[in-house]
Image (cartoon, coloured by chain):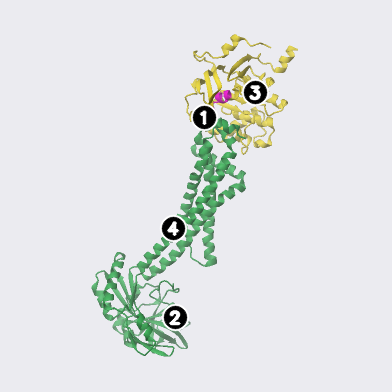
Chain colours: A green, B yellow
């Protein structure tokens, strides 16, 4: 019976609000935009952060990536004469890292050499990645065809290569892929597998793999290309000696990643006083991205909160006007025998109906805006279910909070005075 | 025309010490209503004693400021006496809470106002059913009862209309039907014909007369003598107290009395 009386009140509230359609709609606007803003902002923020987090996760949250880096002073003098730049990670570093830390599961070395792939008349600039089979465990990508490099390939010094999907499309389209011979920097390799690779490279972080990679066994790379590379730029020649270009360290658990990274960095700093290496810890980036995202959410949430507050005040304003306007009605109801709490209930329900209607329209707009942003601006957005739930709760909450004062004012009117009101 | 008999008057005024009679609906004993205006106390009611029997029809009149409005508000349980005892159906009003007072209005009283006071956004049927809503009677039972009441006041055909679509007389009939919805012990009418032309006013008075004939207790405030003449008892107030109470001969309208005199 209480339920049907409540429904009766809701029905009456809707009816009363429909009497002043224009006014009710204008009053709802604050809620509509407030709720719409909350959902849309959270969806845009969530979309952006999901993209960033996704990218970081692709780097592997248990991994530490160490890259060889040309020291600054040498980079400056390098162009002046034909001297040898010797820098970067050493074969010794690989063993030392692998053996010194209990928390390190494995270390995967990589030699990265610029090269050119050629099949028939087609050529493609490649990045030759000389590495071990464990690379494919740490940098997990979909294998489209064939197989990855195995320990046997290393043992047998096999001239085999795993290309990316992109590389295959450019070099071998229309041909039999697996078993094809590819000429890379004056050496023939047999294609044994094709992997998917990251098509997009974000500017803030670089994934270990690129779409122009050609994976070969590391000992084959050392044997064929050695440690010295020669590059020509604007008339001058420069030679570089780099033993290893990259080490990917896998730590046994996420909890140990940051402490292990710090320890490795301290050790490498001792043996590399020139600072010819750089470290990136995806987990740290992840943490940072999450912190940024949190700040972003707080800022957006505050803005949306303010618009909801203004929406609520708008509703309160109209309800106060409505109470004044309907003083006589309140007097009649009280004279007939309505209790104070019943008057409170009536006006409160009316306010909640108003704010929830606004909230529901706002949810519609909040769903529409991210969808349009994705279509028009090509930005990823993700509407989170909890933001919709939160909006409903906020709508009801605002109705109750901002409706309470006008409702109490209505209920506390003296019925005699209210009846005499014209 | 009968003159005021002192003996009759005193019998109408309740004895302050006397026990309530069986057929008594309302009993006022030394009721005071005092308002504070600046640093002065104004006695809107100054020690009123009154006893109203079940099924009687009263008209309260008096000049403005005589306390008749205060009297009606008090009898209608919209207000509480500052001092004294007001027994309605044997219950003392002075010591009740606001909620209890609302409950008494809901169960025992019905109001008819000068300006009809219908709720504009509700239909005739919904207006009549309003007290039923607060009594917890809703749905088809409420609409059936509202329809019966509308028919009783002669508006059975206008259930779905809005108050603004009705004439003044029709609106007052709706208001009367609404006041009857809770089957009240006392029907209180504040200048029920004040906003109506004479003919319409007379038809409303006839309706009230019918209701009285059916046993309803009616208390009406009016300043028009020929409207007051429809009542069984005419009570005149002056300076916050009862100046006179006169009993009209039963079932005689003012017009009939004038004819008899002529």
Q: Which of marks 4 and 2 is in front?
A: 4
Query: In this orientation, which residue lies closer to the viewer: B245 or B158?
Result: B245
The quadrant of the image that shows the N terminus of chain B is top right
Q: Give the range drawn in magenta.
A: B70-78
Q: Which residue corresponds to mark 1? A: B102
Instruction: Give the structural element (helix, strand or loop) at label 1.
Output: helix
Instruction: Give the structural element (helix, strand or loop) at label 2.
Output: helix
Assess whether residue A376 is covered by the magenta stretch: no
Q: Dot 4: few (<14), some (14–19), or many (≥20) neighbours within 10 Å?
A: some
**Label 4 to label 3: alpha-carbon separation:** 67 Å
Label 1 resides on the chain identified as: B
- Residue A298's tag is 4
Label 4 resides on the chain identified as: A
**Label 3 to label 2: alpha-carbon separation:** 103 Å
Q: Which residue corresponds to mark 2? A: A168
Q: Quadrant of residue B147?
A: top right
């Amino acid at each position: 019976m209480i339920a049907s009386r409540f429904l009766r009140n809701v029905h009456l509230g809707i009816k009363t609000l429909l009497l002043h359609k224009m006014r009710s709609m204008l009053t709802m606007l604050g809620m509509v935009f407030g709720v719409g803003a909350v959902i849309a902002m959270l969806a845009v923020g969530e979309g952006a952060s999901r993209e960033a987090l996704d990218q970081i996760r692709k780097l592997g949250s248990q991994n530490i990536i160490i890259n060889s880096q040309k020291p600054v002073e040498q980079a400056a003098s390098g162009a002046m004469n034909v001297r040898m730049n010797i820098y970067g990670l050493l074969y010794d570093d690989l063993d030392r890292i692998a053996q010194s830390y209990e928390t390190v599961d494995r270390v995967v070395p990589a030699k990265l050499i610029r090269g050119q792939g050629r099949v028939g008349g087609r050529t493609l600039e490649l990045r030759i990645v000389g590495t071990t089979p464990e690379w494919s465990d740490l940098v997990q990508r979909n294998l489209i065809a064939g197989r990855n490099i195995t320990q046997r390939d290393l043992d047998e010094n096999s001239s085999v290569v795993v290309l990316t999907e992109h590389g295959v499309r450019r070099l071998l389209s229309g041909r039999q892929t697996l078993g094809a011979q590819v000429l890379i920097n004056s050496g023939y390799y047999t294609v044994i597998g094709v992997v998917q690779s990251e098509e997009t490279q974000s500017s803030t972080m670089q994934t270990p793999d690129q779409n122009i990679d050609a994976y070969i066994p590391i000992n084959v790379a050392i044997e064929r290309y050695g440690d010295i590379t020669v590059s020509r730029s604007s008339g001058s020649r420069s030679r570089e000696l780099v033993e290893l270009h990259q080490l990917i360290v896998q730590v046994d658990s996420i909890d140990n990643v940051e402490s292990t990274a710090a320890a490795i960095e301290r050790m490498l700093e001792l043996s590399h006083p020139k600072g010819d290496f750089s470290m990136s810890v995806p987990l740290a980036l992840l943490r940072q991205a999450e912190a940024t995202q949190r700040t972003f959410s707080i800022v957006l949430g505050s803005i949306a909160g303010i618009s909801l507050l203004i929406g609520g005040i708008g509703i309160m304003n109209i309800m106060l006007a409505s109470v004044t306007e309907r003083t006589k009605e309140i007097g009649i109801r009280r004279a007939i025998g309505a209790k104070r709490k019943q008057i409170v209930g009536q006006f409160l329900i009316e306010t909640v109906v108003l704010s929830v209607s606004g909230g529901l329209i706002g949810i519609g707009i909040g769903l529409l805006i991210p969808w349009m942003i994705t279509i028009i601006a090509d930005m990823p957005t993700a509407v989170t279910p909890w933001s919709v739930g939160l909006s409903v709760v906020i709508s009801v909450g605002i109705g109750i909070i901002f409706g309470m004062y006008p409702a109490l004012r209505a209920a506390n009117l003296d019925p005699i005075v209210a009846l005499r009101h014209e | 025309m009968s003159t005021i008999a002192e003996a009759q008057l005193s019998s109408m005024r309740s004895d302050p010490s006397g026990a309530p009679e069986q057929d008594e609906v309302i009993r006022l004993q030394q009721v005071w209503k005092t308002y504070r205006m600046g640093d002065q106390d104004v006695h809107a009611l100054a020690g009123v004693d009154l006893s109203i029997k079940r099924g009687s029809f009263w008209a309260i009149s008096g000049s403005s400021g005589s306390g008749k409005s205060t009297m009606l508000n008090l009898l209608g349980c919209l207000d509480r006496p500052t001092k004294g005892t007001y027994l309605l159906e044997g219950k003392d009003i002075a010591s009740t809470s606001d909620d209890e007072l609302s409950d008494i209005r809901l169960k025992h009283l019905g109001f008819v106002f000068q300006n009809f006071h219908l709720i504009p956004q509700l239909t005739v049927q919904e207006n009549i059913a309003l007290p039923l809503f607060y009594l917890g009677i809703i749905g088809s039972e409420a609409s059936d009862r509202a329809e019966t009441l509308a028919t009783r006041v002669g508006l059975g055909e206008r259930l779905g209309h809005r108050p603004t679509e009705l004439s003044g007389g029709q609106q007052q009939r709706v208001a009367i039907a609404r006041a009857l919805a809770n089957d009240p012990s006392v029907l209180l009418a504040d200048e029920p014909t004040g906003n109506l032309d004479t003919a319409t006013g007379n038809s409303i008075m006839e309706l009230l007369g019918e209701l009285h004939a059916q046993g309803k207790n009616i208390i009406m405030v009016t300043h028009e003598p020929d409207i007051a003449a429809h009542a069984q008892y005419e009570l005149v107030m002056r300076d916050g107290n009862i100046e006179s109470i006169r009993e009209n001969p039963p079932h005689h309208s003012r017009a009939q009395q004038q004819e008899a005199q002529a």
